[in-house]
Image (tube, helix red, strand yellow):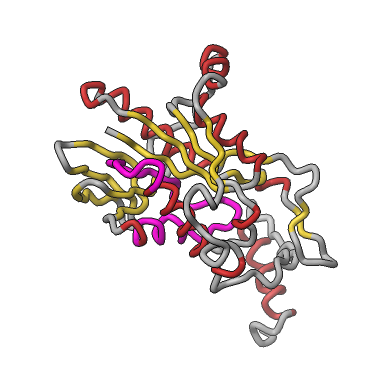
Amino acid sequence: MKIVILVKQVPEADKVAVDPETGTLIREGVASILNPYCEYALDEAVRLKESYSEKDIEVIAISMGPPQARSALLRCLELGADKAYLLSDRKFAGSDVWATSTALKEGVSKLEPDFDLILTGKQAIDGDTAQVTAETAEQLGVPQITYGVEVKIYDKRIEVKRETDEGYQILSTRLPALVTMSKGSNIRRVPSMKQVLDARKKPLDVISAEDLGLDENKVGLKASPTQVAKVFAPPTKIGGDIIDGSDPKFAAQKLLEYLVKNKYLKDV
């Protein structure tokens, strides 16, 4: 059985800044990491591999990005993936969510056409669109379940526990399928030294657009119906007034004065 993990390298969210002049992200000196939600998906895949050993599960990580995205895939190999592919080509530059899903669809179809299950993070912490994986499932023509927190495998079906605003749902679908993962009970593992060393021996192949039979009109800016015109930081909010509530009578008087002063109430 083959489980494919679609992952993304992202900048550390707490270190991202926006250039006020150009409106672009300042990436220089900002460390890149494996998207945390992708780690939850990977953790679920490794858990399934350990729980269903009789199915001889193989875990394959695939990412699209620049050459430095190898580090994110290397972490996947350290955390339990068996092999990895990096889709990297200048022709991919500027791809929006649709063009990215096209490249990922071709990557999965050409590299691992006999996949059984695709697991992904529910979203990436840099773009937060949560659209790429849904569009990839659509292009692959497989059913998808979003916001999963636990997956169970049966003969040719899976059962997924998924988060909702009201609680949880249990859904079932046939295989092959795609599931986006939330945190749930999954963890971001810390690899052992042996796992770190063993990861260097696992296959990690770099795949170009030509390898996938993709021309420049199907990926990159030319194939992107949407483009980001500008990125900007929201204006800084001024903190509100705080009234000490330890003395209810004093707090009530202060609140009344505030409401009157700001003309929320007439003078009393």
Q: Is residue 184 magenta?
A: no
Nearest to the observer: residue 37 or residue 137: 137
| Coordinates of residue 159 in the picture (x, y in percent) | 21, 43
Q: Is residue 108 among the parts visible in the rendering?
A: yes
Nearest to the observer: residue 250 or residue 241: 241
In-image side of 258 versus 158 (left or right): right
Task: Looking at this view, name the residue that lies furthest to the right.
Answer: 21
| Coordinates of residue 195 in the picture (x, y in percent) | 51, 17
Q: Residue at x 27, y 33 (%)?
A: 1
Nearest to the observer: residue 83 or residue 43: 83
39, above or below 49, in the image: below
Tell me which segment is drawn in magenta.
110-138
| Coordinates of residue 68 in the picture (x, y in percent) | 67, 39
Q: Is residue 127 magenta?
A: yes
192, above or below 27, in the image: above
Q: Is residue 37 among the parts visible in the rendering?
A: no
> Which quadrant of the figure contains the C terminus?
bottom right
In-image side of 57 versus 15 (left or right): left
In-image side of 157 versus 64 (left or right): left
| Coordinates of residue 190 in the picture (x, y in percent) | 53, 23
242, above or below 194, in the image: below
Q: Residue at x 54, y 51 (%)?
A: 210
For residue 80, which quarter of the picture?
A: top left
